[in-house]
Image: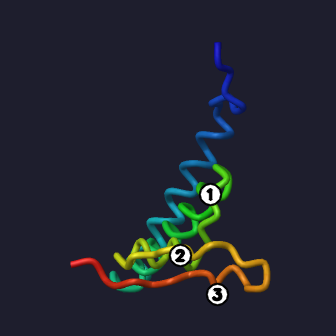
Amino acid sequence: MYEPPLKINDKLNDAVAEISDKLDVLRNSLSEEMFLELQKTSMIKRIHATCAMAGNALTLEQVEMIINDTYVCMDEPDPHKEESESITTVSKRK
């Protein structure tokens, strides 16, 4: 049977509650536009990290392009090019 690496206890619950309280303070002190931009940036970084853990070669820039609804095509890897030079942006989706 699967054993999760963390045990739910009072210390963990207190930490989650503290984080939630700090997020509420942050949310209330920022404009909605700024808060949404921070959420989007956070989402892009989380997706990139998750993809990297799964062995996906998407760069942070490519993940951002996908989130922004832009097609991303990868050219064949060229050992003489930087990874970002292998990105071909086709177009915005319609």
Q: Which mark is residue 70?
A: none
Residue tagged 1? 56
Colour style of the rendered protein structure: rainbow
Tag 2: amino acid? Gln
Of the numbered discs 3 and 1, the one sitting upstream in the chain is: 1
- Mark 2 surroundings: few (<14), some (14-19) or many (≥20) residues within 10 A: many
Which residue extends farthest left? 94
Residue tagged 2? 62
**Foreground: disc 3 or disc 1:** 3
Q: Position of residue 69 (x, y in %)?
A: 34, 76
Tag 3: amino acid? Glu
The answer to which of 83 and 43 lies nearer the viewer is 83
Which residue extends farthest right? 80
Tag 1: amino acid? Asn
Quadrant in the picture for residue 37: bottom left
- Mark 3 surroundings: few (<14), some (14-19) or many (≥20) residues within 10 A: few
Label 2: state its secondary structure: helix
| Cα distance in 3D space between marks 1 and 2 | 11 Å
| Cα distance in 3D space between marks 3 and 1 | 17 Å
Of the numbered discs 1 and 2, the one sitting upstream in the chain is: 1
Q: Position of residue 23 (x, y in %)?
A: 49, 65
As drawn, is 29 to the left or to the right of 94? right
Q: Position of residue 60 (x, y in %)?
A: 60, 74
Of the numbered discs 2 and 3, the one sitting upstream in the chain is: 2
The answer to which of 48 and 33 lies nearer the viewer is 48
Label 3: state its secondary structure: helix
Q: Which mark is residue 85?
A: 3
